[in-house]
Image: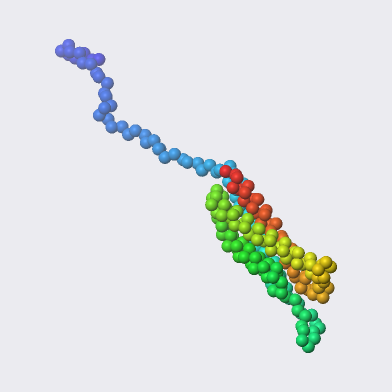
Amino acid sequence: MATGKNGETAINMPETKASVKGTAPLLNSSKTVSTVEHPNRGVKKGFAIGDFVLRLCALGAALGATVAMGNADQVLPFFTQFLQFEAQYDDFDTFRFFVLAMGMVSGYLFISLPFSIIGIIRPFATKPRLFLVIFDSMMAALTIAAGSASASMVYLAHNGNDDVNWLPFCQQFGDFCQSASGAVIGSLLAAALLLVIIILSAFALKIN
């Protein structure tokens, strides 16, 4: 407050800042979104990797069984003028079914590998895994059927059956029986691996 010469009193008013355009600080509205990994992601991915590895092993066993049975062939070194003693897999309907069934299983396991890779990339994708569980069950049943039927034929080839006068012939056709026996073992190994794969897939589907 100031007093002038003519006695007038001047009151000094504080300057308002209405005319002053201030720059308000800008608030950063962008929020940093932190990616929170699902607690079960590692577990499901581990199941998917195990599925892929076991699927490769099953493919090798099934393909090896198919090749071994398909190459089961032996010709005895002695023969007569009218007869030649030879044993081939296609002489037995059971072994022909075995080659056909194991060929189908091998083809399916090869085709299923990309679906298994999808399970590794996307662990929470349920449709590919459900597709694999359904067809794995069908192929496991087919493998067990082919392997068990051929195992009975291999047993008869080794031991025969006295009740129906079926004589064993593996003493003469040793290489043929060895190939057939190896093929049966490979098919049963493939069936066991498929069962393990089905169990792993069921656990993976159960985990959310």
Q: Viewed as shown, does residue 8 lie left or right of 72?
A: left
**Residue 149 picture quarter:** bottom right
Q: Viewed as shown, does residue 11 lie left or right of 39?
A: left
For the point 57% across and 43% down, the residue is 208
Q: Nearer the viewer, residue 56 or 16?
A: 56
Q: x and y percent of residue 128 in the render?
A: 55, 54
Q: x and y percent of residue 76 in the render?
A: 79, 80
Q: Nearer the viewer, residue 108 or 91?
A: 91
For the point 75% across and 64% down, the residue is 151
Q: x and y percent of residue 7 in the render?
A: 17, 11
Is residue 106 something one can see in this rendering? no
For the point 62% across and 49% down, the residue is 202
Q: Quadrant of the N terminus?
A: top left
**Residue at far bottom of view:** 81
Q: Viewed as shown, does residue 200 lie left or right of 11?
A: right
**Residue at far top of view:** 7
For the point 80% across and 86% down, the residue is 80
Is 131 rendered above or below residue 183? above
